[in-house]
Each structure stands twice: as C-alpha cells, then as structure tokens.
Image (tube, coloured by chain):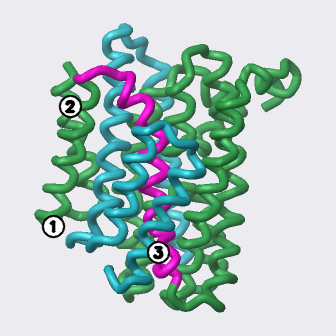
Amino acid sequence: MGSIWRTPAWRSIDRRAGRDIGLACLAVFVFGVSYGAIAVAGGLPLWVPAMLSVLVMAGSSELLFVGIVAAGGNPLAAALAGVLVNSRHLPYGLALPAGVAGRGWRAILGTHLMNDETVVFALAQDRAETRRAVFWTCGCGVLIAWPAGAVSGALLGGIVRNTSALGLDAVFPAMILALIFPALRDGGRRLRAAAIAGAGIALAGTACGLPAGLPVLLALAAVVVAC
Amino acid sequence: MLIAGILILAAGTYGFRAAGRLLQARVTFPPRVRKLLETAAMVLLAALVAVTALTQGHDAAGFARPAGVAVAGLLAWRKAPFLVIVLAAAGTTAALRLCGVT
C-alpha cells in the first residue's frame, strides 16, 4: 500500500464515493452481525465465523459453509460448496483493470481484497487512479468491518435468539442491489437485459436443485445478450 | 476436520481470485472484450442479488425478505441514499415478520 500513502491517491476519492464506501462498510458490518449470529445459533463456536471472515472474506460462501456444517454436513463438502460459490471471483479478476489490486508484494493482499463490494465500487470509477484508491479503501474497510461484524454477531447471537426477526438477511441482497443500480441505469438497455436474463437463469438453476453457486455461475451465459 | 474445511475454502477462494488476476495480467484484451468482462461482473452480481433475495436453499424465500429487497430496489431507483436503502430493506423485512408474514 506504500504508494497509496506516499502519493495521496485516496484524495482522488470524491466525498460522495468516500461516504458511500463508509456506508457500504457499515452494511457489511450489519450483514456480518447476522452471519455471526446465525453461526453460533447453529451451534458453532465463535472462532469459526471469526476465522472464516478473515481468511475467506466472501460473505455468501461463508454463510453457506456455516449452514452446511451446522446442519451436520461434512466440513470438506461444505468447503467445496463454498469454493464453487466463490468461483465468480475469477471473472471479477478479469474485469478489474491491471494494477487496481496492486503490483508485486502488494498484490498478495490486493488479491484477497477482491470481493463483491470492492469490485463493484472500483468498476464504477472512470479514472485508473481513482479505481485503485477506491478499491483499496473499500477493501481495507471490508477487511475490518466484516470480521468485526461476525464477532459481534457471534457474541450477540448468544443473547438474541431469533435474529431473523431483525430482517438482517435482507441486508446483503439490498446492499449489492443498491451498489449495482447506478451501473445498470447508465449502462444501456443491453446491460440491463443481460442482468435480468442472468438473474432469471440463476433463479431457474436454483429452483432446479443445482448446488449453490452453480446457478450464479451459469448466469454468465446471459452475457451473450449484451453482445 | 473443521479447520481443514475452513482452510480449503480460504485457499480455493484465494486461488480463484489469483487466477483471474494472473490471467488478466498475461492477456491484453481489446476494449470491446474489456467492456464485456465488466458486463459479466454486473451479470454475476445481479444473479447473486436474485438468488440471495428470493431463494432459501432450493426453495422460495417466502415474502418478507423479497419484499424488503424490493423496497430497496424502489429506493435505489429513486436515488435514495445508500444507508436509507439498506435500513429500509431490513426494516421492511423485520416489520413484516413482526406482523407474522414470513
């Protein structure tokens, strides 16, 4: 991150984007709370969501892992299901322009910070410098907010029994929807058509009983709509 | 076994992240393909929203959560602030459940 602090690249983030990143991190924290609470409600010790949140840092796969293990499933099978869900990070890496996630040794951390939130924020920027600054600011924010939320939720889960009453399961889809909405609005009719077709494919795949993660991946076929 | 599962998930996830980056660094894409790759990322995110909003396992997610996310979509369309969108989604879902709607 050296260059970011030497040349104050983060100053290229305008106030609006900075505020949005802060709020996204807050939403990630809230989603983390629901995740941690679900994990301990399923009978898992606190260190499981804590360790996952730092080492995996991809919310929906962690929820799936915790759900399978809590239901008595094999942890290795749960891991494979989670890896399948996270295979969408490969196209994310392709979509991010070179250098956004850092070069050299910085790329080791930059690669880890690649997730739904950081990718959508970075892609929303026009200038390369701003993209990099936004990616790292959002990434570091999520790296703090997600584990902090998970641990808080695990602690809270011991007190509040029924966390679904708080409606926290709506936070993750609402957050991602809010983040992609500007791009969908300004991206033209073809992008919107592709996004809707992709959502339809993923829903159909899920309804057909395909393993979690696969339907979202199959949604990529909808990209042809945008060609 | 549990720790092994966590480590496999972490390594596999990192592997996919690294593979996309390494591939990207080795191949230079023409602008048209670049644009298509960005579209692919948006399509994946839209599919993720649909699945997490509307399904639970292989079944429908009931009414409360989809309604909350629908309110979020409406507010996003009206260009509401981010925090308002997220809180309204959770609030709508919570309120519906309070009224006995699942």
For badge 2, the amino acid type reads: Ala
Give the mark count.
3
Number of the front mark, 2 or 1: 2
Q: CA distance from mark 2 to mark 3?
A: 31 Å
Residue that badge 2 annotates: A193
Q: Position of residue A35 (x, y in %)?
A: 54, 71
Q: Residue at x 22, y 70 (%)?
A: B60
According to the rendering, which colour does chain A have?
green
Quick check: can you spot residue A154?
yes
Extent of the magenta region: A163-189
Q: Quadrant of the N terminus of chain A?
A: top right
Q: CA distance from mark 1 to mark 3?
A: 28 Å
Q: Which chain is cyan?
A: B
Q: Chain of mark 2?
A: A
Query: Seen in the image, is A34 located left or right of residue B20?
Result: right
Looking at the image, is A36 positioned above or below residue B90?
Answer: below
To the question of a shared chain for discs 2 and 1, the answer is yes
Residue type, numbered disc 3: Ala
Most foreground residue, B97 or B20: B97
Image position, residue A207 (x, y; %): 15, 64
> Can you tell which of label 2 and label 3 is closer to the viewer?
3
Q: Which residue is mark 3?
A: B94
